[in-house]
Image: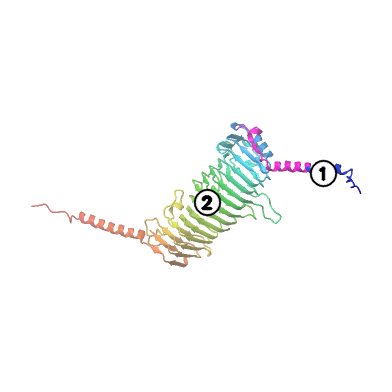
Amino acid sequence: MRKASAMIIPKHLPRLFAWGLFLLLTVFCAVTVLSAAETAEPRILNVRDYGAVGDGVTNDTAAINAAAADLRDGETLYIPAGTYLLREYGEMDIILIQDRRNIHIRMEDGAILQLDTVEDYAISDQNHHFILHLVRCENTTVTGGAIYGDRLRYTGSMHVVQGYGIRMIDCKDLTVRGVEIAYLRGDGIMMFTGIKNPDGTREKCENITVDNCHVHDCLRNGITLSSVDGCVISNTVIHGIRGNAPEAAVDIEAEFSGTVNKNVLIEGCRFYDNGKLSVAVTGPSRNISISSTSLEQQFSQGDQGDGLTLSDCTAGLVCVSGKNAVIEDCHIYQLRLYGGHVICRSTVFDGTPHPSAEGKDKLIPFRVLVTKSDGTTVGHFESCTFRGRRLCALGGCIVFCHTPPAEMTFTDCGFKSCGLIPFLGHLDTTEREGCFFDIGWALWLCILAVAALITFLVLRRRKKKIWVSKPAT
């Protein structure tokens, strides 16, 4: 019988097996470490850990900047309750954060970033200072707390207006929520452009949200949009903006050539007690919408605007000269058209001026005023109500002045207390279909005239003693 031969194992096989096992364990450990690193909680950088005190006396500028400089993508800069005194000492950027993604700047309730002030000689570049300066940041949130400027502290003589609470340049997907911003010698929030492309166009801020904020007592504007594509301002209160033009709650201005503001929505806000304007739209703009908002001061849109919607708003003076404007379900004191095209639906033009109206704005009784028409002014009014307010025959609702005339149509509108002349001026193809004209003040004038005549006759007869009874004999 033949014996089975024994298996021959190569001498180097155990060594190869050992090396393979070692490499496998090494790869496993590396993957485990990397996975643990990826799932680790992102850092929260507390400014107190960097030396910030928050007592309102200590200068915390360097400490907060150290924390901001250490901030990496995906991390949180945390500011606990306290008053953190900031001083610029000639620097433009008080707190600078740039080129960061997925970061969160979280201020606790009671946290205040308070800008101190310095002597005029220590201020460079006309005091262009930005308390929180965000440059090219993406997917960033700023929440809670307060940012105060030095308007109440400044005692110098320059009286410059270049102070900003939050300034953002070319940022994307950025949200400011629940922040109080006040006492700036400039703007509360500014959205700006910094990069100019070779073709002459500029970069812009995109998808910016300002929600549930309180902006007040700033010198120039509450919120300024200089170059924005996509912005929502919601549930925000802005007041006390006065001191230097344009004094607007929201100023939508395309400041540079090649810039445009578009796709802007303002909803659920209240703008009151501001120096001049609730909302100003100047320069090229596209698709500006304002809904469920109180605009106590003037709203104005320039002739480079295209696509405006006012819905469910209360407003004082509304000035429109752009194209494709729609006003619906609003309550307006007066509408002024300077050209362009507007459609008004289900809107009340009330005869009572707002308390903020001054000078001639308080005296002009007309609800819709077409002025400086160039022949392109077009207005269509559907299911609107016009109320006069003057106790006189010429206390009309609408006046058209200057030639060439405007093209106006009225469908199912009501004209109340409009006097003897509801329309005055040059009309071109004016259509009034299904409209209601009450006799309004004309009736009261007739009643007063009859009452005056009766009073005159009674006094005359009494003077001649026609009704005096003779004494009994």
Q: Position of residue 470 (x, y in %)?
A: 12, 53
Residue 39: in sight, yes or no?
A: yes
**What amino acid is at disc 1?**
Gly
| In front of the other: 399 or 353 | 353
Asked whether residue 232 is drawn in magenta, I would say no
Give the percent coordinates (x, y) of residue 80: 59, 35
Quick one: SS at disc 1?
A: helix
Comparing labels 2 and 1, the label whose residue is closer to the camera: 1
Residue at 85 percent of width and 42 percent of height:
14
Color style of the picture? rainbow
**Secondary structure that dominates the magenta span:** helix
**Depicted 398 relative to depicted 182: above or below:** below
Badge number at residue 302: none
Of label 2 and label 1, which has the lower sequence position? 1
Mark 2 Cα within 10 Å, few/some/many (few <14, many 20+)?
many
Q: Quadrant of residue 77?
A: top right
Q: For residue 304, what is the image quadrant?
A: bottom right
Disc 2 marks a residue whose amino acid type is Glu
Where is mark 1, residue-wise?
Answer: 20
Residue that label 2 marks: 267
The residue lying at 9 percent from left, 52 percent from top is 472
Q: Position of residue 464 (x, y in %)?
A: 19, 55
Residue 335, compared with residue 164, is above or below; it is below
**Total count of labels:** 2
**Image location of residue 285, percent across then percent down:** 59, 56
Distance from label 2 to label 1 (Cα)?
65 Å
Would residue 282 be seen by someone viewing this image from the given angle?
no
Q: Is residue 362 left or right of residue 47?
A: left
Give the magenta range.
25-53
